[in-house]
Image (cartoon, rainbow, N blue to C red):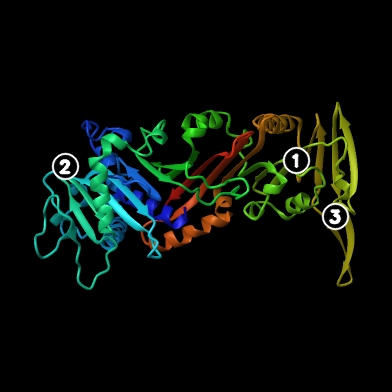
């Protein structure tokens, strides 16, 4: 799944979040229906590449005072909203979307071997009193029930070419007439076939926005040797908006292998927030410190990893906050790691102090340098090391006893998540501006360019957990991304 498709879904989600007024507390029964009970599901043809389902019934994130103060921003948002609708072929005229749309939406894409771009099918519910004419705003009235109608706009490009209204107030629109026919046939056979993602909805039925795909998006740990595409594997991504933050959670699911949401609940419940609350927390083996992680660590950490001469499956924990960094790993008694052998520390002086069973070391270097006939003292950054209970910790700051205990507990806790049958376990938690350094989030620039006069979306936090046990063919892979909306 390419990020641009996710960007489209994000933009459409924001469109729903911002356009509609917040509904009253006394929601009717239809609005409070769980996604798995939606009548719209019967109109989804099988063999889709991407499926987005929305049952959103609570909308606004700006209050009335903010609206009054930012009337220009609101006008700009209306402009981009109208531009998106115009691109797909909808022209509301003087109508308001919130007066037409009735809280059920699916967006689905399908492979088209004859075209460079996929075909799209959009189904949404409208209010009983509304018609196709309210959506298209064409000179001639064309509203007809149960008839596929060509969308013909002279001198305009519209992504949707055909439109159809059902007798139960659903609009089906597509770039391909055949997909509308498939959608109608799907509704007729729904009782026999059931919804194709029914199993994947277990644990997700109370979500309001869900995206189903057969491929995982860009991943820190994505590796074809680890992650083999399987038609039975489904990736479910949920969308939620809280306190001006758009939260995306993705799960790799496979019902035949008993990988469901409950599996992830057990995994995530073990992952308490680190007490040190660093901006960067990485627990992984060396081979996973690839191009995605290198932008997040400094030169010393990169050089250390490149020179690290222990087993390649050795797990390393890196914590990074502001200018402070820390590396933790297990000591190998058979092949003892010698920090002094690092090229960076070759000419440094070492001083060691033992406290109980812990061994503290400092590596320092001061030299004199002559420049412009002036003798100056040049001081290099100190490097500190602690050997404690089978662990070795390397840092650019001195670690006290209290912090040493927390770090050791954190490492051992993460290690415990990798039991005897687990051959792969890694976790990355990246916060604040550092998360935008990840290569694949640079694509947000394109989305921000489109909405630059209204909103700015920045990646605030990224969490990724991957775990695989013997004899599983595929891992459990969970990602959580928080976008800040300004």
Residue 168 is labelled as 2
Return the residue at label 3: 343
In the foreground, 406 or 420: 420
Separation of disc 2 and disc 3 at Cα?
A: 73 Å
Residue 314 is labelled as 1
Under circle 1, the secondary element is loop
Q: Position of residue 273 (x, y in %)?
A: 58, 34
In the foreground, 103 or 394: 103
Disc 3 and disc 1 in contact, CB within 8 angstroms: no
Disc 2 and disc 1 in contact, CB within 8 angstroms: no
Q: Position of residue 206 (x, y in %)?
A: 36, 32
Pair 3/1: label in front = 1
Asked where in the image residue 394 lies, by quadrant, the reply is top right
Q: Position of residue 465 (x, y in %)?
A: 58, 39
Residue 38 visible to an observer of this rendering: no
Using residue 109 as the reference point, say whether residue 255 is left or right of it: right
Give neighbour class at mark 2: few <14, some 14-19, many 20+ (Cα, 10 Å).
few
- Residue drawn at point x = 56 percent, y = 50 percent: 435
Among the two numbered marks 2 and 1 on one chain, the one whose residue lies closer to the N terminus:
2
In the foreground, 257 or 41: 257
Residue 158 visible to an observer of this rendering: yes
- Residue drawn at point x = 56 percent, y = 42 percent: 464
Among the two numbered marks 2 and 3 on one chain, the one whose residue lies closer to the N terminus:
2
């Amino acid at each position: 799944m390419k990020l641009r498709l996710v960007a489209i879904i994000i933009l459409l989600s924001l469109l729903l979040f911002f356009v509609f007024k917040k509904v009253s507390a006394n929601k009717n029964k239809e609005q409070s229906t769980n996604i798995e009970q939606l009548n719209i599901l019967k109109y989804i043809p099988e063999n889709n590449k991407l499926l987005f389902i929305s049952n959103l019934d609570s909308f606004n994130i700006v209050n009335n005072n903010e609206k009054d103060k930012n009337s220009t921003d609101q006008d700009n948002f209306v402009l981009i909203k109208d531009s998106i609708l115009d691109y797909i072929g909808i022209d509301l005229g003087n109508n308001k979307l919130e007066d037409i749309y009735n809280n059920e939406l699916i967006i689905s894409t399908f492979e088209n071997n004859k075209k460079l771009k996929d075909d799209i099918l959009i189904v949404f519910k409208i209010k009983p009193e509304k018609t196709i004419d309210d959506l298209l705003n064409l000179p001639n009235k064309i509203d007809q029930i149960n008839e596929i109608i060509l969308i013909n706009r002279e001198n305009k490009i519209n992504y949707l070419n055909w439109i159809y209204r059902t007798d139960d107030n659903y609009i089906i629109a597509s770039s391909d007439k055949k997909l509308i026919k498939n959608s109608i046939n799907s509704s007729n056979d729904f009782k026999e076939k059931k919804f194709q993602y029914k199993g994947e909805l277990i644990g997700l039925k109370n979500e309001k926005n869900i995206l189903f795909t057969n491929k995982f998006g860009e991943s820190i740990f994505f590796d074809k040797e680890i992650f083999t595409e399987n038609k039975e594997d489904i990736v479910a991504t949920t969308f939620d908006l809280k306190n001006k933050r758009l939260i995306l959670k993705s799960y790799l699911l496979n019902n035949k292998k008993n990988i469901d949401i409950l599996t992830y609940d057990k995994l995530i419940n073990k992952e308490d927030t680190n007490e040190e609350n660093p901006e960067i927390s990485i627990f992984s083996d060396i081979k996973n410190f690839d191009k995605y992680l290198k932008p997040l660590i400094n030169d010393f950490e990169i050089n250390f990893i490149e020179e690290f001469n222990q087993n390649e499956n050795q797990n390393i924990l890196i914590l990074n906050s502001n200018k402070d960094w820390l590396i933790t790993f297990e000591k190998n008694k058979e092949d003892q790691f010698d920090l002094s052998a690092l090229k960076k520390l070759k000419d440094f002086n070492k001083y060691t102090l033992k406290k109980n069973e812990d061994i503290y070391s400092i590596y320092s270097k001061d030299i004199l340098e002559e420049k412009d006939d002036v003798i100056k003292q040049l001081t290099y950054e100190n490097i500190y090391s602690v050997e404690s209970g089978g662990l070795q910790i390397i840092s650019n700051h001195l670690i006290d006893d209290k912090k040493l205990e927390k770090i050791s507990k954190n490492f051992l806790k993460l290690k415990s998540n990798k039991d005897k049958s687990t051959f792969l376990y890694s976790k990355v938690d990246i916060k604040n501006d550092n998360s935008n350094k990840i290569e694949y989030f640079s694509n947000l620039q394109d989305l921000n360019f489109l909405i630059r006069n209204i909103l700015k979306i920045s990646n605030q936090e990224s969490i990724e957990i991957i775990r695989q046990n013997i004899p599983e063919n595929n891992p459990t892979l969970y990602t959580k991304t928080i976008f800040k909306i300004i």
